[in-house]
Amino acid sequence: MKTLEIIFFILLFIVFYTYIGYAIVLWCMVQIKKLFGRKRERIPFEEWPEVTLFITAYNEENVVKEKMQNCNELDYPKDKLKIMWVTDGTTDRTNELLAAYPEVKVYHYEERRGKTAAMNHGIRHVKTPFVVFTDANTLLNKEAVMEMVKCFENPKVGCVAGEKRVKATRKDGAASGGEGMYWKYESCLKKWDAQLHSTVGAAGELFAIRTHLYRPMPEDTLLDDFMLSMKMTMDGYIIDYCDKAYACESGSANMQEEEKRKVRIAAGGLQSICRLTPLLNIFNYGILSFQYISHRVLRWSVTPIALFALLPLNLALLNYRPKMYAILLLLQLLFYIAGFYGRHMACRKVRSKKLYIPYYFLFMNINVIKGFIYLNQRKGKNTGAWEKAQRA
């Protein structure tokens, strides 16, 4: 029983640390750095540099007009901003609609190979020193490009991660509501990560890089944004976080569509851990390894297993220390009941943001385990193409 008890508390600590403890430790470390740390070096640009706005697309005819209007409203010198679309296996009217915009460079590839392949192909045509990657179905704030470029005044910055925002509506379901709350929490962690040392990965909705740092990735890469940005940190650069630049998109249409995203992201996370093994060596990468393991690796590997192992372990220990383990068991059961009731409310399309939190939390961790299966099923495939999740 003593061994089981030790395992139980180790797993409990892992779950607590991953979702709450790291945030507390990170905040404390940031406050200490503010008191004793040195300001980062900045070398202001003499004039705004040329930038390519890089958009990958697969059958996006429904958003071309809105996206192009958004691009043309960006507050950046028009002669310095180049707009490029790379369409990957598109079979709808996307290319036809883009032909109405002579200022846009369009590169089309007949065979659908996935976003990573489209990025690898398209980057060859980029002639500007900086690239801003964004998705076709996201809208940027007017200052986004300008604010991200300012971050590159720090010569140590190789990548700038923008903020992802999920559009809130009165009809938000569990998918949109849960994703929105998750990204608010995630954005806070990213900001603190950057203040301590480096943000741990960029999100594909909006991020920018120094063009010469781009390294072609295997075409079966599932998290191209994360892999590309983290490779730069391994080369000695940092990822800055710019909350003044944000991309807005709708949440998933429903939890079935959100599951597609979460399983793919989880599988991509596991794939990334395998391909970024040197980053696990804290003796080589120091604070970066600490951030990477705490913020990403635990979430994508050990923690979901630890979470779901706690309940049977708690039951096994119930007779060992009845009072203490009865309380812990009750707390666990109440959390699971709240999660299942949140699912019930979501199925009935009843809004309940408080109950969406435990539901979405359990939903995310279940899909990490499904990600193991999904990644195994993809063995032998040399394409990164996936089925898009429908948006609300």
Image (tube, helix red, strand yellow):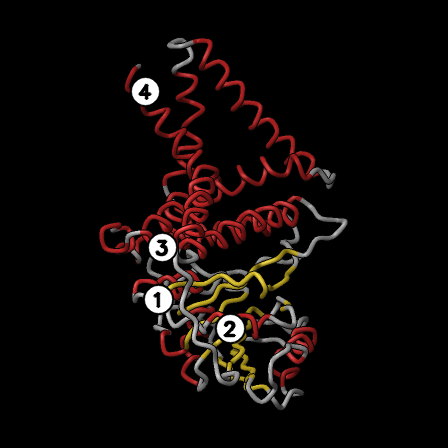
Give the numbered dot on residue 346.
none
Is 17 on the left or on the right of 150, as rendered?
Answer: left
Residue corresponding to mark 1: 237
Camera-side mark, 4 or 2: 2
Camera-side mark, 4 or 1: 1
Nearest the viewer among 202 and 362 is 202
How far apart marks 3 and 1 lie (CA) works out to 22 Å
Residue corresponding to mark 3: 271
Nearest the viewer among 106 and 68 is 68
Type of amino acid at the residue the image marks with label 3: Gln
Q: Earlier in the sequence, mark 4 or mark 1?
A: 4
Residue 183 in percent (x, y) is at 57, 51
Residue corresponding to mark 4: 4
- Name the secondary structure under disc 4: helix
Pick out the residue farthest to the front. 36
Q: Earlier in the sequence, mark 1 or mark 2?
A: 2
How far apart marks 3 and 2 lie (CA) works out to 32 Å
Q: Is residue 370 visible?
A: no
Camera-side mark, 3 or 1: 1
